[in-house]
Image: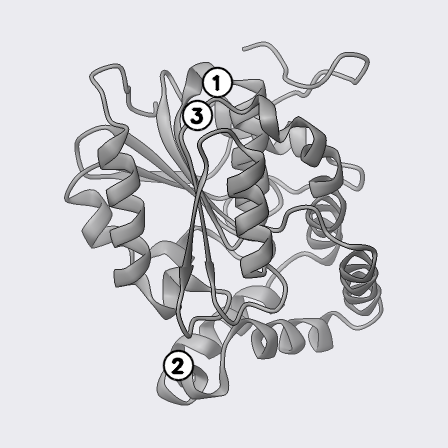
Amino acid sequence: MSGMGTPGTRAATPVALGHETHGAGPGLVLLHGVGLDRRMWERCLPALTARHQVTLVDLRGHGASPAAAPGVSLAELAADVAALLNGPAHLVGFSLGALVAQRLGLDRPDLTASLTLVSSVAGRSEDERAAVARRREVAARDFGASAWAAVDRWFSPGWRAQEPILARRVLDTLLANDPVSYLACYDVFATADAGLWPLLPRITAPTLAVTGEDDPGSTPAMSRRLAQRIPGGRAVIVPGARHLLPLECPERLTEAILTHTGSHTGHQECHSS
């Protein structure tokens, strides 16, 4: 498969990603956020596999996939995912995974049946860019403190009180990361939206942006910006929800995903390999 990227950049060489596939039907690919892995989608899987053949992916630098080197690019992360596909699929990306999905929508429209961008950043302000840079500095200096802070930011105190075991599992997943791979991918998460922003009007896939009403980093304003910037885009804001929608409110999220994919499913979609 040929590498992806913009003219003048080095071609991306895909790596073999850890992944698993469940269900039958039009292909749907789930892409997780930075520091997490494909297990974050477990609460969404029953509803999604009732309608789709679902492939859960570990992005480069995460889970069962190869390490990510410093300087890894968004185009490379997208090329890794493209190498799994043998035809169009519905791409559902969370946070970093949403940026990967956008890059795929730009570089490989032939593989993109639709985009669902969950808790995605977009067009960060200078203050928002500075805040994410500070979080990156904390992660480089004290990885454990960074992981604890992420869980505090991602979940409301009420949800953590109701789901202490799951919140702890998310924390343990973060703490298990290789710091070099994590920081390499965090750099992509922290900066790639700036490069995507001027290109978003070129996306042709039907696009839905979904975020939580109380998400402090992937704000409702960002999802609305995505919907306005991408032709025909739509935004859904989940009342009372924070960041990790696939775990916090899987029923509401899967309803939004399936409504979107159901409106844009034809006979051309193929399955992942």
Q: Residue at 17% of width from left, 39% of height from top?
A: 51
Q: Nearer the viewer, mark 1 or mark 3?
A: 3
**Image-quadrant location for residue 264:** top left
* Amino acid type, mark 2: Ile
Give the vertical position of 152 relative to 217 (above or below).
Answer: below
Q: Determine the secondary structure under disc 1.
A: helix
Q: Secondary structure at mark 2?
A: helix
Which of the two marks, 2 or 3, is nearer to us in this view? 3
Q: Which residue is mark 3?
A: 205
| Alpha carbons under labels 2 and 1: distance apart | 40 Å
Q: Which residue is under mark 1?
A: 109
Residue positioned 20% across, 52% down in the render: 47
Residue picked out by circle 2 = 165
Q: Is residue 186 above or below residue 77?
A: below
Instruction: Name the one closer to the observer, 187 or 105.
Output: 105
Question: Going by the image, does 232 lie left or right of 87?
Answer: right
Q: Nearer the viewer, mark 2 or mark 1?
A: 1
**Identity of the residue drawn at 74% across and 47% down:** 184
Gap in Å between the C-alphas at discs 1 and 3? 7 Å
Q: N-terminal of the two: label 1 or label 3?
A: 1
In x, y percent, where is residue 41? 37, 55
Give the image location of residue 55, x and y in percent.
Answer: 34, 37
Secondary structure under tag 3 reads loop
CB within 8 Å, label 1 to label 3: yes
In depth, the one of 76 and 260 nearer the eye is 260
Kindly identify the amino acid type of the residue bearing the numbered disc 1.
Pro
- Identified by mark 3, the residue type is Ala
